[in-house]
Amino acid sequence: MGAHSATWQAYVDSSLMGSGQFQKAGVLAADFSGLEAATPGFALSQEDINSLASAFTSSDNAFANGFSIAGEKYVCIKADERSLYGKKGKEGAIVVRASACTMIGVHGATVQTTNAATVVENLIDYINGAK
């Protein structure tokens, strides 16, 4: 946990979870070294982190293999150098990179992935603008 961890936890609690769109959320360090903040019980294995890092590196790889978050496998529906969107049945995951961190939000079956994505994308825009 870096110096930012208290701030990142506030983003997780108020911005991500406060949106009402997510079941769990976390903030990964910019260098993918581990979680800086998360909802209780939300954890990423090194395997999860590696799968996210490789999905960002290669969108082809992401679409072919999906990615995993907290041990759950997601089918990739969007992948570029900024954003990964995944689906697992009706549930989904939104992973968006900023210069300072990577935000992860996992939503339930009753939430539209597009709505969940808007929350994270706007938050990343805000963080990128607030340097």
Image (tube, rainbow, N blue to C red):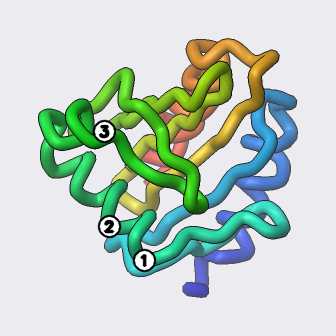
Q: CA distance from mark 2 to mark 3?
A: 16 Å
Is residue 30 in sight in this rendering?
no
Q: Which residue is mark 1?
A: 46
Name which residue lies at 44% across and 42% down: 96
Tell me the kind of residue under disc 3: Arg
Residue drawn at 84 percent across, 67 percent down = 40
Mark seen at residue 19: none
Q: Residues within 10 Å of mark 3 (few under 14, many from 20)?
A: some
* Residue 122, image quadrant: top right
Q: State which mark lies toward you, 2 or 3.
A: 2
Which x, y percent locates residue 79?
28, 31
Residue 57 placement, left or right of 15: left
Q: Position of residue 116 (x, y in %)?
A: 65, 24
Q: Amino acid at mark 2?
A: Asn
Q: Quadrant of the N terminus?
A: bottom right
The picture places residue 84, in percent across and down from the top left corner, at 38, 36
Pointer 2 and pointer 1: residues touching (CB < 8 Å)? Answer: yes
Residue 46 in sight: yes
Q: CA distance from mark 2 to mark 1?
A: 6 Å
At mark 2, the secondary structure is helix
Q: Nearer the viewer, mark 3 or mark 1?
A: 1
Q: Which residue is mark 3?
A: 82
Q: Earlier in the sequence, mark 3 or mark 1?
A: 1
Number of marks present in the image shown: 3
Q: Secondary structure at mark 3?
A: loop
Q: Is residue 110 left or right of residue 33?
A: right
On-image quarter of the C terminus: bottom left
For disc 1, the neighbor class at 10 Å (few under 14, some 14 to 19, many from 20) is few
Please report whichever mark, 2 or 3, sits nearer to the chain's N-terminal start: 2
What residue does disc 2 label?
Answer: 50
Calculate the distance from the C-alpha at mark 3 to the C-alpha at mark 1: 20 Å
Q: Which residue is drawn at the image coordinates 51% and 74% (left, top)?
A: 45
